[in-house]
Image (tube, grey):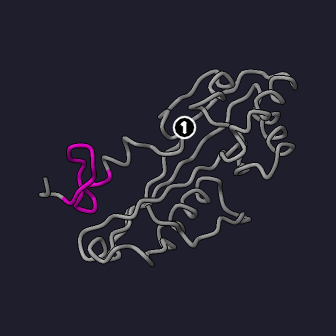
């Protein structure tokens, strides 16, 4: 795993779906390869990055800055449907890229102020787009989804695996490898 030098910043005038794609691409292009062992850089390597943005009526919700913003986000999502866009970017060391964005519709149950406060107090959603995580203690907030669960979790696994051949890679024995490598 390598860090990215890319910094997520809001961008006016673009859709939440486009914002997720921009951030995923930026993270891949900004991958800090300094300190990566030479044998990895000399062989086939694949940089994978992703970003998730929650979309409420065309407005992007990223990660809340604090608990108050987390409560406000959940109050906005309560009792209604929103979209979750997760984009990923694949980048080879020779500069080839592939980008893809998945979208899933999510509907929240109506929530009381106490339910929102109790969830925010767990801290679970403070590092997640929209202020919640479907895969943990936030699961009871969600009434239903229409689409891929993994997209809402933050990484559309099926779409990722099916995208690997576009850059000559495939999933083998639980790890991604260049096609033809066992």
Q: Is residue 143 magenta?
A: no
**Residue 167 found in image quarter:** bottom left
- Residue 90 x/y as whole percent: 39, 62
Q: Is residue 177 magenta?
A: yes
Identity of the residue drawn at 66% across and 29% down = 138
- Residue 52 x/y as whole percent: 58, 50
State how many labels appear.
1
Question: Would residue 133 be found to the left or right of residue 170 on screen?
Answer: right
Identity of the residue drawn at 72% across and 49% down = 61
**Residue 95 found in image quarter:** bottom left
- Residue 41 x/y as whole percent: 31, 75
What's the magenta region? Answer: 163-178
Q: Classify 73 as above or below 175.
A: above
- Residue 140 x/y as whole percent: 66, 21
Question: Would residue 167 be found to the left or right of residue 107 on screen?
Answer: left
Identity of the residue drawn at 65% across and 56% down = 15
Identity of the residue drawn at 74% across and 65% down = 12
Q: Residues within 10 Å of mark 1 (few under 14, many from 20)?
A: some
Q: Classify 174 as above or below 31.
A: above
Residue annotated with mark 1 = 104
In the picture, the quarter occupied by the N terminus is bottom left
Secondary element under disc 1, as helix, strand or loop, is: strand
């Amino acid at each position: 795993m390598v860090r990215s030098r890319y910094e997520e910043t809001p961008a006016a005038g673009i859709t939440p779906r486009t914002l997720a794609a921009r951030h995923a691409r930026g993270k891949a292009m900004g991958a800090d390869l300094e300190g990566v062992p030479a044998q990895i850089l000399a062989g086939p390597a694949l940089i994978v990055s992703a970003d998730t943005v929650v979309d409420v009526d065309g407005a992007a919700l990223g990660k809340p800055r604090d608990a108050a913003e987390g409560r406000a986000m959940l109050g906005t999502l309560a009792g209604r449907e929103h979209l979750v866009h997760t984009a990923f970017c694949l980048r080879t060391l020779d500069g080839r890229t592939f980008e893809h964005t998945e979208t899933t519709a999510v509907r929240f149950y109506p929530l009381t102020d106490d339910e929102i406060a109790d969830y925010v107090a767990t801290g679970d959603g403070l590092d997640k787009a929209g202020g919640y995580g479907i895969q943990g203690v936030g699961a009871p907030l969600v009434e239903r989804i229409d689409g891929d669960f993994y997209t809402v979790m933050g990484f559309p696994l099926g779409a990722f695996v099916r995208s690997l051949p576009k850059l000559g890679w495939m999933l083998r024995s639980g790890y991604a490898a260049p096609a033809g490598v066992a």
